[in-house]
């Protein structure tokens, strides 16, 4: 596949504080690429670097297919976490404005208007829209000119589950010649629709960049959840050697799949106050931060 974006050792800092540190990744034409992380992990900052809204403090960011940032931007559609458009314009006026900017008639994209359920709000002021309705206006503007690269920062955050599912099966549907890059706090969307997933925490990439086949291999299996009141993981070296994460109340252990039964038998020697669940993408992330 042809490279769309190549990032090498990218750093970004403000007032000597690193917001991104040593980021390196390649993104290819035609793939759906997810960036996952907790709130404040650096997802939006990384997207702002890629779009040129922010410049790196050091390192490099290249656009091999489009040669330079200007050409890349001419082939880009983007939806930000917030949707800042003209509050006193009606929806149809906003669509008309951006249609003229992109050299299209918005009326020629009735397929997209219907998929986004915009018909009923065309005569409403943007300032009177809900957050979800504003997000759908932003999605129209990002997709209407059929760019080669789409970047979506939390694109479904304000949408209900039925609408999210509908969008992934229609507007966001994978296309051979289109690269779609998205961040999300709906981890199941990344699991279901991404070709590859990168994880970011405290401005750094963590774990591996996972392909679809990697995802199955990394998260197949069980996690063992134990109350902190029930066990001290450092009391037994065999427990302490098992990968785990923790929150205020519990430990979350991630034994290798071939050693699950052995680990559970070991835990029962210390406590019966535990539960077992299937591992998830979020567990993979927590185990690497």
Image: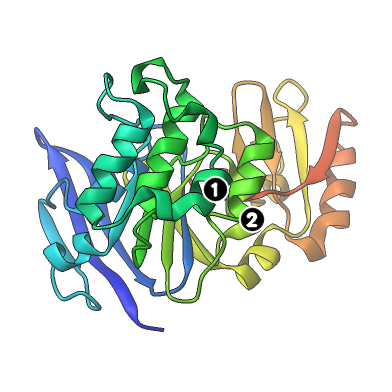
Instruction: Name above or below for residue 22 compared with residue 273.
Output: below
Residue at mark 2: 169
> Residue 125, image x and y in percent?
36, 20
Residue projecting furthest to the bottom: 1
Residue at mark 1: 285
Q: Quadrant of the N terminus?
A: bottom left
Q: Residue at x 67, y 51 (%)?
A: 242
Q: Nearer the viewer, residue 111 or 129?
A: 111
Total labels: the figure holds: 2
Q: Residue at x 85, y 35 (%)?
A: 275
Q: Residue at x 62, y 68 (%)?
A: 212
Q: Nearer the viewer, residue 28 or 12?
A: 28
Q: Residue at x 40, y 15 (%)?
A: 128
- Residue 90 lies in what quarter of the image? top left
Q: Is residue 41 left or right of residue 283?
A: left
What crowding class fits label 1: few (fewer than 14 Cα within 10 Å), some (14-19), or many (20 or more)?
many
Q: CA distance from mark 2 to mark 1?
A: 26 Å
- Lower sequence index among marks 2 and 1: 2
Q: Is residue 51 left or right of residue 107?
A: left
- Residue 120 lies in what quarter of the image? top right
> Residue 239, image x and y in percent?
71, 46
Closer mark to the observer between disc 2 and disc 1: 2
> Residue 282, image x and y in percent?
60, 44
Instruction: Name above or below for residue 98 compared with residue 74.
Output: above
Q: Nearer the viewer, residue 65 or 111?
A: 111
> Residue 131, image x and y in percent?
46, 24
């Amino acid at each position: 596949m042809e490279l769309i974006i190549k990032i090498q050792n990218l750093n970004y800092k403000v007032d000597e504080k690193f917001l991104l540190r040593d980021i390196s990744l390649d993104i290819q034409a035609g793939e759906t690429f997810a960036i996952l992380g907790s709130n404040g992990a650096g997802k939006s900052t990384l997207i702002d670097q890629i779009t040129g809204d922010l410049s790196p403090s050091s390192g490099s960011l290249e656009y091999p297919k489009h040669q330079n940032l200007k050409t890349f931007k001419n082939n880009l559609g983007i939806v930000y976490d917030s949707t800042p458009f003209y509050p006193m314009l009606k929806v149809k006026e906003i669509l008309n404005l951006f249609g003229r900017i992109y050299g299209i008639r918005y009326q020629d994209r009735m397929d997209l208007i219907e998929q986004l359920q915009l018909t009923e709000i065309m005569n409403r002021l943007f300032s009177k829209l809900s957050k979800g309705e504003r997000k759908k206006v932003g999605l129209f503007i990002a997709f209407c000119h059929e760019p080669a690269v789409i970047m979506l920062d939390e694109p479904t955050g304000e949408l209900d589950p039925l609408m999210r599912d509908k969008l992934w099966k229609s507007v966001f549907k994978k296309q051979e010649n289109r690269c779609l890059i998205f961040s999300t706090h709906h981890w199941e969307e990344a699991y279901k629709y991404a070709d590859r997933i990168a994880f970011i925490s405290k401005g750094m990439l963590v774990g591996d960049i996972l392909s679809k086949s990697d995802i199955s291999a990394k998260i197949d299996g069980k996690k063992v959840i134990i109350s902190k009141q029930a066990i001290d993981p450092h009391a037994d070296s065999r427990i302490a050697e098992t990968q785990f994460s923790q929150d205020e109340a519990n430990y979350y252990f991630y034994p290798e799949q071939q050693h699950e039964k052995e680990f559970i038998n070991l835990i029962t020697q210390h406590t019966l106050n535990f539960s077992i669940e299937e591992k998830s993408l979020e567990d993979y992330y927590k185990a690497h931060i």
